Image: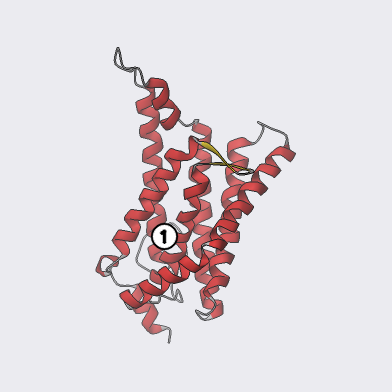
Amino acid sequence: MTDKPVAAQARDLRTYRHFDLLLAIFLVVLLISNLVGQKICQIGPFVISGAQLLFPITYIFGDVFTEVYGYAASRRAIWIGFLANALLAVMGLITVWLPPAPGWPNQQAFATVFYQIPRLIVASLVAYWCGEFTNSFTLAKMKLWTGGRMLWTRTIGSTVTGQFVDTVILVLIGFAGTAPASTLAKLAASAYFGKVIYEVAATPVTYAVVGFLKRSEGLDAFDYKSDFNPFHLGTH
């Protein structure tokens, strides 16, 4: 029972039909969520950033990568996303700091979109890395505990842990000392529960996507023999 999933997971990811496309979409969503995060929106009584509309989707992708292709595939996607995020942040800073050409009137608008406070860049990168790996690890382990049954328990369970780690780290590194602790606690709680509810509501979509991919790829990876070290970049 366990040999088939492990052997399938060890294949070169490029041999799967949909992995590269999913990885590309994941990266696009991740990068766009950083670019639109500057916009503060009001939807009814709720005030949210543009990033809150998109960033939780990256956790859904993390669930799909781990559930279908295994922890090693998710680890690869997380690292590529981390490097892409870091490159976007660094290039944003460099291009904002470069002096604008005489007569170019859009420096302030450009800075509004692309400039991020270095402290928030560090907070965002650390929170993303820790949160995504927590999400993937939790889902992979819960899949073993449940024998692959009850997908909803691990998609929700991994979201609960991953988003908690992401939110707490982001608030602590990004905003500690800038506001009273009670205000930061309310900010963290609001962001956390909003993201969890978002992903719980998306559970039917996750079910549909996971079911399609498992049938199409002929794969349902179980991480019985996987190395869960996030710094191990092999295929197991």
Q: Is residue 102 left or right of residue 145?
A: left
Tell how many labels.
1
Task: Name the side, left or right, on which 145 lies relative to 103.
Answer: right
Residue 114: quadrant of the picture: top left
Residue displayed at 52% across by 80% down: 149
Residue situated in front as seen by the camera: 25 or 118: 25
Density class for disc 1 (Cα within 10 Å; few <14, some 14-19, many ≥20) is: many
Disc 1 target residue:
75
Q: Residue furthest front?
A: 44
Q: Is residue 44 above or below residue 201?
A: above
183 left or right of 226? right
Q: Residue at x 38, y 22 (%)?
A: 97
Kind of residue at badge 1: Arg
Please give the name of the residue rendered at 59% of the width and 66% of the height, measured from the top-left corner: 157
Q: Nearer the viewer, residue 73 or 193?
A: 193
Expressed as whole percent of the image width and height from the top left, the position of residue 81 reads: 39, 50
Residue at 39% x, 34% y is 90
44 or 159, which is in the foreground?
Answer: 44
Extreme residue toward the top, this view:
102
Q: Nearer the viewer, residue 53 or 33?
A: 53
Q: Quadrant of the C terminus?
A: bottom left
Decide: is 70 above or below 7. Answer: above
Q: Element at badge 1?
A: helix
Would residue 201 be visible to someone looking at this image? yes
Expressed as whole percent of the image width and height from the top left, the position of residue 76 reads 37, 58
Residue 229 seen in the current view: no
